Each structure stands twice: as C-alpha cells, then as structure tokens.
Image (spheres, rainbow, N blue to C red):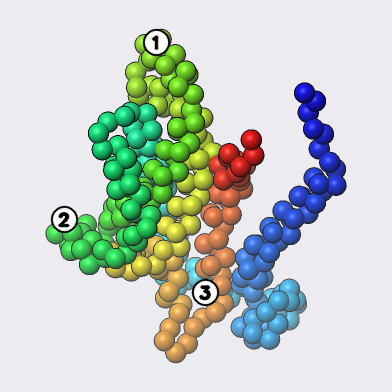
Amino acid sequence: MNKARRNPVNVFAAHAVLIVYTLIALFPVFVIIVNSFKTRKAIFREPLALPGSDSFSMIGYQTVMKQGDFVLYFQNSMIVTVASLFFILLFGAMAAFALSEYRFRGNTLMGLYLALGIMIPIRIGTVAILELMVQTGLVNTLLALILVYTAQGLPLAVFILSEFMRQVSDDLKNAGRIDGLSEYTIFFRLVLPLVRPAMATVAVFNMIPIWNDLWFPLILAPSEGTKTLTLGSQVFIGQFVTDWNAVLSALSLAILPVLVLYVIFSRQLIRGITSGAVK
C-alpha cells in the first residue's frame, strides 16, 4: 500500500492555524510584559503601544526588588511547584501502573474513587485541611502546600497515566519478567520511558494551577518566610491604591518559568494530548 503524500497546501494551512492560535494565546502575555516597562500614565493612556522614550520606565521592577523579598517568594514557589510535581508524577504513575497492570477485586471501584478528585474540588475541604494542618503543626510551612497540591493533582495524573499505560505492550513487560526483571525495574525502565508524553502533559496541567494559586498559600502559609510569588505580589494591590507598575512587573517575572516549561515540554505535551487522535 502506497503511503499518502503530504499535501503542501494542507501542511501550510496547519502551520498557519497553529501560528495564529499561538499569537492569540501569547497576546495577553505580550501586553503584560510591554506595560511592565511603561510609566503609570502610559499604561492607561496607550495600553497596546510599545514603550517609547517618554513612556519607558523600570520603576515597577525597582519596586518589586525593593519592597518585599521577591527572591524568597520566587524560591518558595519553585520549591513547592517542583516538589509537588515530583510527587504527583511519582505516586500518580505508580498508582496508574497498579490499576492498569494488575486485576484485583475492587479495581474499577478504586479507579472511580480516585477519579472523584477530578469532579470534586479540593477547596471544598479547606476548613478540614486547615484544622488538620494546625493539629500536625504544618501551618506556615512549605510542606503543607506540597501535601495539598500533591493530593490535588493525583486524581488527574492517575486518570491520564492509567489510560496511556494500558497501551504499553504486554509482550514487552512479560519479556522483562522472563528475563528476571522485578516489577519496579519494569515500571521504571520499561513503562515510564514509553509514557513520557503523558507525564509531560500531567506536569504542565498541574504546574499552572500550583504556580498561580493564591487560595492555599493565603490560608496555609501566609507568613513572610513562606509566601509564594502569587501571594507576595498581592502586597502591591491595596484596597484604595494599586501599584500597577509593580503588579505588571511581578506578573512578567512570574510568567517566565511557565514559558520555559512550555518550551521544554512542548513536543511531549502535543504528543500526549493528540495521542490516539489519528490511527
């Protein structure tokens, strides 16, 4: 059977559509970054214009660096996000492997129970979570945020990864068992490399809610030493006066890690999202 040749017109159209969607998605980011280098008057007078000689200003970034400990906030956000993603991927992949590989009584019910976390938001249990953290002495610690975000991201991770792991060849895993490989070796050396696109997808889907979250840092870790970047940026937003230069500058700096993650995992993310769409 001859393979169908790619139509150059269709390829060009697909790339054009992708470029248009990318520009639309990045336009708000562009507006935020551009306005972070303007004076306050220029932000409201010409929000879509590029900064000129009379409107260019670094006052926002200077304020961010002087007021509050922005470096510490950034460090706290990185620690919480990276640690949460590590535990989400590790425990989520292990649970997905167990549900997809082994057949036991209650397998389906266990999968449905884990999937409930996708439909029921964890914020409903905020009061109970706060009481638990107070009793365990974890209030105003980064560990409290890591535990909450790990629990928040596990349902989606198990749901996505279990579907991908069911597609891994049983012959490959059985060959590993015949060669004497343990279940842990099969999991880490044979299965995980084959589901990297799905893991990249889970990582991206969980990173953004964790990085941008304000609710749990405000409730569980509001102290100065444990503030995250999003919570620390709220110092520039007052009840009557808002320092828009500082707010836009802080948001511009906060966007950078997310953009870097998308650049690194873009190919794996697209493969994970579109896997199985075309046979």
Say if 19 sits above or below 216 in the image: above
Q: Which residue is mark 3?
A: 247
Label 1 Cα neighbours within 10 Å, binned few <14 / some 14-19 / many ≥20: few
User: Percent x, y for residue 205?
Assistant: 48, 52
Q: Residue furthest left?
A: 135
The single residue placed furthest to the front in the displayed view is 1
**Nearest to N terminus: mark 1 or mark 3:** 1
Say which quarter of the image contains residue 276.
top right
For the N terminus, which image quadrant? top right
Q: Element under label 2?
A: helix
- Cα separation between marks 3 and 2: 35 Å
Q: Nearer the viewer, residue 93 or 68?
A: 93
Q: Secondary structure at mark 1?
A: helix
Q: Which of 157 and 235 lies nearest the eye of the viewer?
A: 157
Q: Is residue 80 visible?
A: no
Residue 178's label in the rendered image is: 1
Amino acid type, callout 3? Val
Q: Residue 230: x and y, percent?
A: 44, 66
For disc 2, the neighbor class at 10 Å (few under 14, some 14 to 19, many from 20) is: few
Q: CA distance from mark 1 to mark 3?
A: 59 Å
Q: Residue at x 65, y 71 (%)?
A: 31
The dot on residue 136 is 2
Mark 1 to mark 2 CA distance (whole Å) = 46 Å
| Residue 92 higher or lower than 239, as above or below | above
